[in-house]
Amino acid sequence: MATNPAVGGNAPGAVRPARPAGRTGTEEYHSGSLPTAQEAAVLFSANHAQAATALLAAEIKDTVGRNNKQAWLMLFDLHQVARDREAFEQLSMLFTVKFEQSPPVWIEDAESSDPRRNTQTRERKDFFALKPAASGELATEIDKFLAFAESQGTVRLDVAKITSLAGGEAQRLAAGLAQLRKKHVPMWFNNLESLEKVLRASINEKAAPDQKPYWPLLFELLILQGRAEDFEELGMEFAVAFEMSPPNWEVYVNKVAEAAKAATPASGARAAADAGFPLKGVLTASSAPQVADLSTHAAAQAEVVVDMAKVLRIDFAYTAAFFDAVKAIQLAGKRVILTELNEINAALLEAFGVNRYAILVRRKSS
């Protein structure tokens, strides 16, 4: 797996990272006694992302470790940081089968993610995994999905299990999705990329008659994702292949998603205050000015909220200094809350006992 030089490194072999200076007594890091998840977090902190990934990958394949959901979520973090989307999506399929729930969303931009993932009360009752029946056919399952979506009023559809489909099944799914769209049912999707590959493999420039039924579903997927430019390009391919006009572009609006986005700025200064003091990047010795600003900010607060959403990694050599800064704020009588932690940074802070001086709030992953 390729790693980002800013956040990853080569495997360390048998060498463990040295204990950071300034830690004594019960606050000391004992690598031999750490749980697997925390050991992986320490390896990542020491810039050994490949070794951390290998350790977690082995953990989720282990008879006992495969039930360790924290290890799965940390692997998602590592793939996200390394920008390895292919590995992220492969893990997503395994996660869905294992835990029967949606995996974390790949973070590309705010527009493409489900805003309900940012709310603590989000329910998973509207999740539907579309997969072939025992006989291999999809038609009955498609009908079940459409009935389910209408009964729930919202739906998140996972299509990772679809590796092939008949022309009639593609037409039925396209018509059903269009029907839900026109009824303004809020929809989210997992693994549409894999279904799109199946559909594109089923069409070609010669456009044999048995391939024509796959085009409507591909057009519909592009509408649901708001991909107007890709829709236009596919329309040109369709016009050339069949010498006829392609379908017209239509706009799909997910009302739940739009309401969530509209509500975000409405709270104004209160929302900014709740977000907390932001730290970002890889926290190293060069981050001392950021931490100093945090201490200054904390002096005037009774409760100090620190936004860790944009912290990629806390460097192993800097953990002691970060620990001491958090501890000093807490000992000054302040309540310290570190929010929006990804799973791997949370595990690191727990390994070093930071959770004894601050409340650690993880980013909502599923």
Image (spheres, helix red, strand yellow):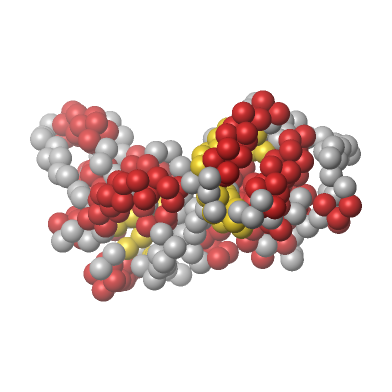
Residue at the image point whose x is 32% and y is 63% from the top: 155
Question: Percent position (x, y) of residue 120?
Answer: 44, 63
Residue 302 versus residue 135 in the image, above or below: above
Q: Is residue 181 left or right of residue 196?
A: left
Q: Quadrant of residue 166?
A: bottom left
Residue at the image point whose x is 74% and y is 38% from the top: 321
Please indicate, yes or no, whether residue 257 appears anywhere in the rendered image: no
Q: Nearer the viewer, residue 237 or 160?
A: 160
Q: Nearer the viewer, residue 177 or 310?
A: 310
* Image quarter of the N terminus: top right
Residue 317 versus residue 126 in the image, above or below: above
Question: Percent position (x, y) of residue 356?
Answer: 71, 58
Q: Is residue 196 left or right of residue 60?
A: left
Question: Percent position (x, y) of residue 70?
Answer: 64, 58
Q: Is residue 259 left or right of residue 26?
A: left
Q: Is residue 216 left or right of residue 33?
A: left
Q: Nearer the viewer, residue 96 or 300?
A: 300
Q: Quadrant of residue 44?
A: top right
Q: Quadrant of residue 219?
A: top left
Residue at the image point whose x is 16% and y is 31% from the top: 239
Please identify the residue farthest to the bottom as the structure is shown. 151
